[in-house]
Amino acid sequence: MGVKMFELIVILFVVWCIYCFATGKFKPENQAKNKEELREALKKLFPQTAVKTETDSIKKLNPSNQDYVIHYEDFKQNFSFRTITINRLYKENRHWYVDAYCHSAGDDRTFRVDRIQSLVTEKNNFTLTNTNEILSYLKKYF
């Protein structure tokens, strides 16, 4: 029974891979389109917040004692919204990480910065959706 289940899982995985490559889900232009759709969805989800792109306006924020809402994609490509309180920012093996208390999980967690799709400040109604801007903001204040 266990071998049959394993074979079925392998077959389903292969079919899924073929489907994804045949439909172009892994092509960069489709990923860019998906990110743009995500930005639009975030604007609808957080209508009171404006999506900012100017680095100068980032510097005006005071992040101390502030909670953030992040839209995060884990290594399995699962998306989730999490409310976090950032403890520190650090670089390890070419990647930047944030150690934070995750209110959603009720425990400390580590998040890879390049997997944060958006960062929303709850106090200042400020949203960042560009990885470089998110990293610049975090470097400035943490």
Image (tube, rainbow, N blue to C red):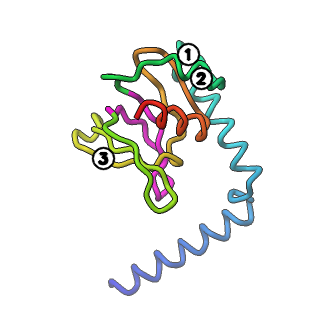
Check disc 2 and report its element: helix, strand or loop.
helix
Is the Cβ of the residue at disc 2 closer than 8 Å to that at disc 1? yes
Q: Name the residue under label 3.
A: 109
Q: Left or right: 128 with respect to 124?
A: right
Q: Earlier in the sequence, mark 2 or mark 3?
A: 2
The numbered disc on residue 55 is none
Vertical comparison of 22 with 1: above or below: above
Q: Where is residue 140 in the image (x, y as percent from the top left)?
A: 48, 32
Q: Which of 55 and 110 is in front in this view?
A: 55
Rendered image: mark on residue 43: 2
Q: Which amino acid does label 3 sit on?
A: Arg
Local crowd size for mark 1, using a 10 Å CA cut-off: few (<14), some (14–19), many (≥20): few
What separation in Å lies between label 2 and label 3 (alpha carbons)?
Answer: 26 Å
Query: Per the image, is 71 magenta?
Result: yes
Q: How far apart are marks 2 and 1 (CA)?
A: 5 Å
Give the position of the C terminus as an image quadrant.
top left
Magenta stretch: give its range: 68-85
Quote the CA–CA distance across marks 3 and 1. 28 Å
Of the numbered discs in the image, which one, if any, rests on residue 47?
1
Q: Please state the total of marks drawn on the protein image.
A: 3
- Whether 126 is drawn above or below 92: the answer is above
